[in-house]
Image (cartoon, rainbow, N blue to C red):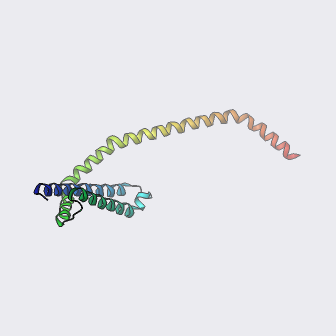
Amino acid sequence: MTVSQQFLSIAALIASGVVGAAIIDLVRSFSFYAAPKSLLRKGYILFELTAWILLGIGTFLLLMVVRDGEWHFVDFLSQLLGFCLYQLFLQSLVRFCGRLFVRLVIHPIWFIIRLIIGIVRQIIRIIVKIVMIILFPLRFVVEKIKNFTLKK
């Protein structure tokens, strides 16, 4: 393996360490901000364990592509360096971008969905009230017929 190939594999594993740390941070943030009785909060350990397993599989696939499946101790150190780089320099930037994404994309979409659901509910309520107004006079007739048949 040439020096340039080794450098590229180390750079790829550092980048995978940064991405892995960001994914774990994202998983922990989702679990932290989830509602207390939600499935995400209750199954937090399983959710994070699944994320770690998928990251391990992804790292193995990256090693298959970059180094034909050979694992060296420098690979572990490269990923550890990526985790540390994320924690030291990139965590605040990624969290800021995440909050910005939530405010600019998720909240407006959630507002539109809630608005549509509210409009549909009001339409259904109006239809039910109209039907009840139409059926109101028939109620007395049905009660009279029911009382008459019960007396017999």
Residue 62 locus on image (x, y percent): 25, 57
**Quadrant housing residue 57:** bottom left
- Quadrant of the rendered image containing residue 6: bottom left
Query: x and y percent of residue 21 in the render?
Result: 25, 57
Q: Is residue 119 left or right of residue 139?
A: left
Q: Nearer the viewer, residue 28 or 37?
A: 28
Residue found at x 33% / y 56%: 27
Tell me how many marks there are: 0
Q: Residue furthest left?
A: 3
Q: Residue at x 30, y 44 (%)?
A: 101
Q: Please name whichever residue, 8 or 77, is drawn nearer the observer in this view of the structure.
A: 8
Using residue 7 as the reference point, say whether residue 106 is left or right of it.
Answer: right
Among all residues in the image, which is located at the extreme bottom? 73
Q: Is residue 127 above or below residue 83?
A: above
**Residue at the spot 60% in from the left edge and 34% down from the top edge:** 127
x%, y% of residue 44?
Answer: 38, 61
Q: Quadrant of the N terminus?
A: bottom left
Q: Position of residue 70 (x, y in %)?
A: 21, 63
Instruction: Name the residue: 68% across, 32% down.
Output: 134
Q: Quadrant of residue 146?
A: top right
In this image, 32 relative to 86: left or right? right
